[in-house]
């Protein structure tokens, strides 16, 4: 299946589900309260997500699934690092050990 088509279909499903939840919970009225800075981050996040999905599906088309998925899941470690640096979250032994194991597992599966 073409990766762009797969991303478009997946996006439509997510769009319908997420707006359905917004209307079901009655939160649609809050859209007017979103600040410009938040709009910017939401738009940038959407672009990053779309590009991520396109790259992921393309990688699945041309690469081994057993190697693509660990690389994709390595984003957990990058998220943890960004949480420490940007959000100033506490670094714990548990998170360090978890991050190290995810990193080791990623490299074991890739090589």
Image (cartoon, rainbow, N blue to C red):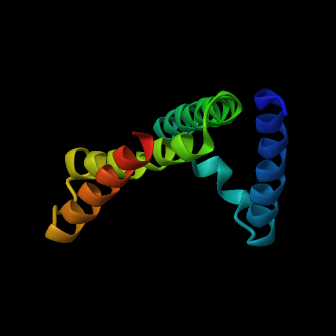
| Left-right relation of 19 to 89 | right
For the residue pair 23 and 65, the one nearer the viewer reads as: 65
Name the residue located 35 percent from the left edge and 44 percent from the top edge. 107
Q: Position of residue 64 (x, y in %)?
A: 60, 38
> Looking at the image, which residue is at 59% across and 38% down?
49
Q: Residue at x 72, y 58 (%)?
A: 29
Give the answer, above or below, for where 26 lies relative to 2: below
Looking at the image, which residue is at 48% across and 48% down?
Answer: 70
Rendered view: 13 above or below 71: below
User: Residue 27's image quarter?
Assistant: bottom right
Q: Nearer the viewer, residue 68 or 15?
A: 68
Q: Is residue 35 above or below residue 22?
A: above
Q: Position of residue 81 (x, y in %)?
A: 26, 47
Residue in the foreground of this view, choosing between 90 and 73:
73
Image quarter (top left, top right, bottom left or bottom right) of the C terminus: top left
- Total marks shown come to 0
Q: Position of residue 68 (x, y in %)?
A: 55, 40
Q: Position of residue 80 (x, y in %)?
A: 31, 53
Query: Taking 37 as reference, is 56 left or right?
Result: right
């Amino acid at each position: 299946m073409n990766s762009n088509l797969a991303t478009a279909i997946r996006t439509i499903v997510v769009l319908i589900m997420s707006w359905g939840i917004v209307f079901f919970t009655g939160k649609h009225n809050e859209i007017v309260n979103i600040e410009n800075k938040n709009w910017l981050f939401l738009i940038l996040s959407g672009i990053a997500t779309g590009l991520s999905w396109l790259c992921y599906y393309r990688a699945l088309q041309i690469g081994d699934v057993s190697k693509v998925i660990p690389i994709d899941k390595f984003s957990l470690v990058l998220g943890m690092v960004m949480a420490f640096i940007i959000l100033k979250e506490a670094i714990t032994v548990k998170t360090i050990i978890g991050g190290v194991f995810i990193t080791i597992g990623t490299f074991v599966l890739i090589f």
